[in-house]
């Protein structure tokens, strides 16, 4: 089974449109082919970002988003972070995602911000887009 971490921007994209790779990826959950990991700090970021006014499109209410996030937490591989690699990346919130990926022994960070995760190969982790990850799943 492939371990991954899903960056917040993928959930934002899935929330805004049901036509793209992000929505297709999230729709596969839970999956027998991959497991995604979550930490308390990442869950808090998901909650903060997805419930912002600019992301409440009318298709989902804040209550529905919070229920969805609780569901994600229920099916996710929850990890505690006991060490910090900071600063490794430019953005401390990206460092938080990397720390989780290292702790969970994830193979991929699924994100649209590939350039923000430069130099993570040293940890044996690769940043890829949702579309590329879906293509990998077809081969598994």
Image (spheres, rainbow, N blue to C red):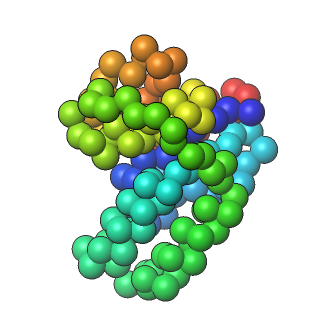
Q: Is the residue 50 above or below the residue 124 in the image?
A: below
Relative depth, front residue between 82 and 126: 82
Residue found 23% across the figure and 40% down from its top? 91
Residue that protrudes farthest toward the left in the picture: 90
- Which quarter of the picture shows residue 69? bottom right
Question: Is 128 left, or right, of 106 in this rendering?
Answer: left
Residue found 60% across the figure and 46% down from its top? 79
Question: Is 123 left, or right, of 1 in this rendering?
Answer: left
The answer to whether residue 52 of the structure is visible from this angle is yes
Residue that protrudes farthest toward the top in the picture: 122
Residue that protrudes farthest toward the right in the picture: 32
- In percent of width and height, residue 42 lies at 44, 53
Q: How many numbered discs?
A: 0
The answer to whether residue 131 of the structure is visible from this angle is no
- In percent of width and height, residue 32 lies at 78, 44
- The quadrant of the rendering that contains the C terminus is top right
Q: Is the residue 5 above or below the residue 115 in the image?
A: below
Relative depth, front residue between 17 and 3: 3
Residue found 42% across the figure and 63% down from its top? 44
Q: Is the residue 58 above or below the residue 127 in the image?
A: below
- In percent of width and height, residue 77 lies at 66, 48
- The quadrant of the rendering that contains the N terminus is top right
Q: Is the residue 69 above or below the residue 139 in the image?
A: below
Residue found 42% across the figure and 41% down from its top? 97
- In percent of width and height, residue 54 lies at 25, 74
């Amino acid at each position: 089974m492939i371990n991954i971490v899903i960056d917040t921007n993928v959930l934002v994209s899935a929330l805004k449109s049901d036509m793209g790779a992000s929505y297709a990826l999230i729709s596969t959950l839970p999956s027998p082919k991959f497991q995604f990991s979550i930490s308390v700090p990442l869950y808090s970021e998901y909650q903060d970002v997805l419930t912002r006014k600019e992301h409440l499109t009318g298709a989902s209410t804040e209550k529905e988003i919070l229920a969805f996030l609780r569901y994600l937490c229920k099916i996710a591989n929850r990890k505690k972070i006991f060490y910090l690699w900071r600063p490794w990346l430019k953005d401390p919130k990206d460092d938080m995602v990397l720390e989780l990926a290292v702790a969970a022994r994830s193979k991929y960070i699924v994100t649209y911000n590939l350039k923000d995760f430069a130099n993570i190969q040293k940890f044996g982790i690769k940043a890829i887009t949702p579309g590329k990850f879906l293509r990998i799943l077809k081969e598994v």
